[in-house]
Amino acid sequence: MATTQTSAQPNRIETPTGSAEWRGLEWDSQQFGIAAARLELLEASGSYAEARSIKSELLASVLDQCRETGVRHLSARVDTEDFTTIHALEKAGFELLDGIQTFLQPLNGNLGPAPPGTRMFEPRDLPEILEIARTAFIFDRFHADPALSPAIAEQVNESWTRNCCLGTAADAVMIAQLDGGIASFVTCRADRQTRHGIIILVATAEWARGRGAARRASSAALHWFAGQGMKSVEVGTQLRNIPATRLYENLGFRLTRTSLTFRKIL
């Protein structure tokens, strides 16, 4: 999962051979209880050795700026093929937290009928959805970060889900029901300009796992995206979340890229 909340203005460092950019994360800082930021760009030209050396120098400047402004938690997400950045981060003491797979599905109008027992979120659903959010996310980077307690990780996921339901972090929430209760939910964001949709969160109640609830909620999300005129939809999950990987592949998604998430405590 990627952080989706609003952030401060970026800080940029430019040299003739490279550039770096980092941004303070206001929402993450509030949730973590410490000042948090994200490295958003680290670029350099030249051979592997030259690029890695330049990136290490840029990264040292970023770390100095972060320390000066009080940042304590600095994260970075890097494509798995970007070895110069990965090795520069490792040299600077960043720790690997998780890996992300990103899947994509074009929407061509051949979705079939909408799945039964699904509907859009209603305000009365919020307590039940938040209860699922507190316990469903076990593979996320927040739980994988030893700098964050399990209680903070659960709080982050609950708060993120609440913001999605209230419309500040998502455009729609689709629900699948079983036995009269909410079994699974999917939060959706639609980019009207690019006509590209993003599935942000997918969660299933523990009692409903293995009963197809996540598949029905995800399928309902695809129908919602199609109804909004989206031409494609993407979704990401951790490399170790095998059940989610199987779900997305069975729904017709195909793997398009992978990335790694690093973190350093200053």
Image (cartoon, rainbow, N blue to C red):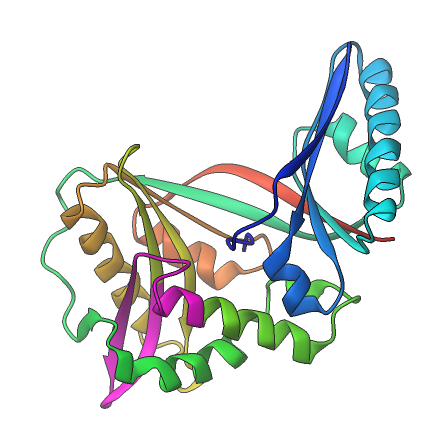
Quadrant in which the N terminus is drawn? bottom right
Query: Toward the viewer: 175 or 22?
Result: 22
Query: Toward the viewer: 211 or 98?
Result: 98
User: Where is residue 205, by image quadrant?
Assistant: bottom left
* Residue 63 rendering spot, x and y as whole percentages: 85, 40
Q: Tell whether position 11 is magenta.
A: no
Q: Is residue 218 visible?
A: yes
Query: Toward the viewer: 252 or 176?
Result: 176
Position of residue 237 in the picture relative to residue 185 (left or right): right
The residue sitting at the bottom extreme is 180
Q: What residue is drawn where x is 39% and y is 64%? A: 164
* Residue 216 rendering spot, x and y as whole percentages: 25, 66
Looking at the image, is 197 positioned above or below residue 127? above
Position of residue 90 in the picture relative to residue 191 (left or right): right
Position of residue 187 in the picture relative to residue 114 (left or right): right
* Residue 187 rendering spot, x and y as whole percentages: 36, 62
Q: Which residues are magenta?
A: 162-186
Q: What residue is drawn where x is 81% and y is 25%? A: 55
Looking at the image, is 170 positioned above or below residue 22? below
